[in-house]
Image (cartoon, grey):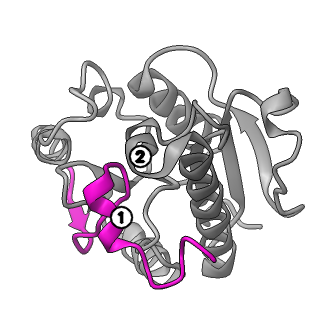
């Protein structure tokens, strides 16, 4: 594939009871929260592949080969890497640097907890990236579910107040300070808290 195609990197934790979607445990229990995390991961990978914009990678915590992933089916077409050590910002910055600097591709880095991030939204982001320096798809809680970059831009991830309502705004402010031309995608909803469950598509929790 041409290196002008972006690599779509899906960041995810293993959907293991007690370790995945812990803020949903009061509503769903540990197993229910893990089951939803697994369903959302499946959905995210399916949408990433269906977008058809370039190679798809699952950047995993814990890394590939860990027993936590033993019973998790991952499509054969999906590349597998480990997130490595450090806080979320360090891990994201490392993935962005690896793709943009080492592999020479643009990167779209996305989470796995937003069913509203469909193949159509991903395709539109990829369509916008060639004419922008960066892009961001925000979510209603103040974070973002997808970021696109053509270069490492480590200051976008350093000392970020993760899991707060200011993450997207602070990221956009830092992008502006760098002089980046930014495309901002539609405001979506991710699923982190019990109240967010109302945003799930019908039937998403299964029988």
Q: Which residue is mark 1?
A: 197
Q: Which quadrant holds the C terminus?
A: bottom right
The residue shown at (10%, 42%) is: 173
Name the residue: 65% across, 43% down.
15
> Marks 2 and 1: CB-CB under 8 Å?
yes
Q: Residue at x 77, y 67 (%)?
A: 1
Is residue 3 at all visible to an observer of this figure? yes
- Left or right of 14 on screen, residue 178: left
Can residue 133 be seen here? The reply is: no
In depth, the one of 110 and 123 nearer the eye is 110
* Residue most extreme to the top: 86
Q: Residues within 10 Å of mark 2 (few under 14, many from 20)?
A: many
Q: CA distance from mark 2 to mark 1?
A: 9 Å
The kind of secondary structure element at disc 2 is: helix
> Is residue 43 placed above or below 73 in the rendered structure?
below
Which of the 4 image quarters holds residue 128? bottom left
| Left or right relative to 167: residue 20 | right
- Any magenta on residue 128? no
Which range is magenta? 180-207
Q: Is residue 200 above or below residue 196?
A: below
- 32 or 56: nearer the eye? 32
**In the rendered image of this protein, does residue 152 appear above or below residue 88?**
below
Q: Is residue 1 left or right of residue 206?
A: right
**Residue located at (63% from left, 63% from top):** 39
Instruction: List the residue tagged with mark 2.
Output: 24
- Percent coordinates x, y for residue 101 in the rendering: 56, 36
Residue 204 in magenta? yes
Picture coordinates of residue 80, whole percent (x, y): 78, 44
Rendered image quadrant of residue 63? top right
Relative side of 39 to 114, left or right? right
């Amino acid at each position: 594939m041409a290196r002008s195609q972006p690599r779509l990197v899906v960041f995810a934790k293993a959907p293991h009871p007690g370790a995945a979607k812990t803020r949903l445990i009061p509503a769903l229990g540990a197993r229910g929260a893990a089951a939803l995390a697994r369903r959302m991961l499946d959905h995210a990978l399916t949408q990433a592949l269906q977008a058809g914009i370039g190679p798809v990678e699952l950047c995993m915590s814990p890394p590939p080969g860990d027993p936590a992933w033993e019973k998790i089916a991952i499509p054969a077409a999906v590349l597998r890497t480990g997130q490595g050590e450090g806080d979320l910002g360090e891990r994201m910055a490392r993935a962005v640097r690896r793709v943009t600097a080492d592999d020479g591709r643009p990167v779209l880095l996305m989470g796995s907890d937003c069913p509203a991030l469909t193949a159509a939204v991903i395709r539109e982001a990829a369509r916008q990236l060639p004419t922008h320096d960066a892009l961001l798809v925000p979510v209603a809680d103040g974070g973002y579910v997808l970021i696109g970059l053509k270069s490492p831009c480590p200051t976008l991830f350093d000392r970020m107040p993760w899991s707060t309502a200011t993450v997207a705004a602070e990221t956009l402010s830092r992008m502006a300070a760098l002089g980046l031309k930014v495309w901002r995608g539609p405001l979506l909803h991710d699923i982190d808290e019990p109240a967010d469950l109302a945003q799930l598509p019908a039937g998403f929790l299964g029988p």
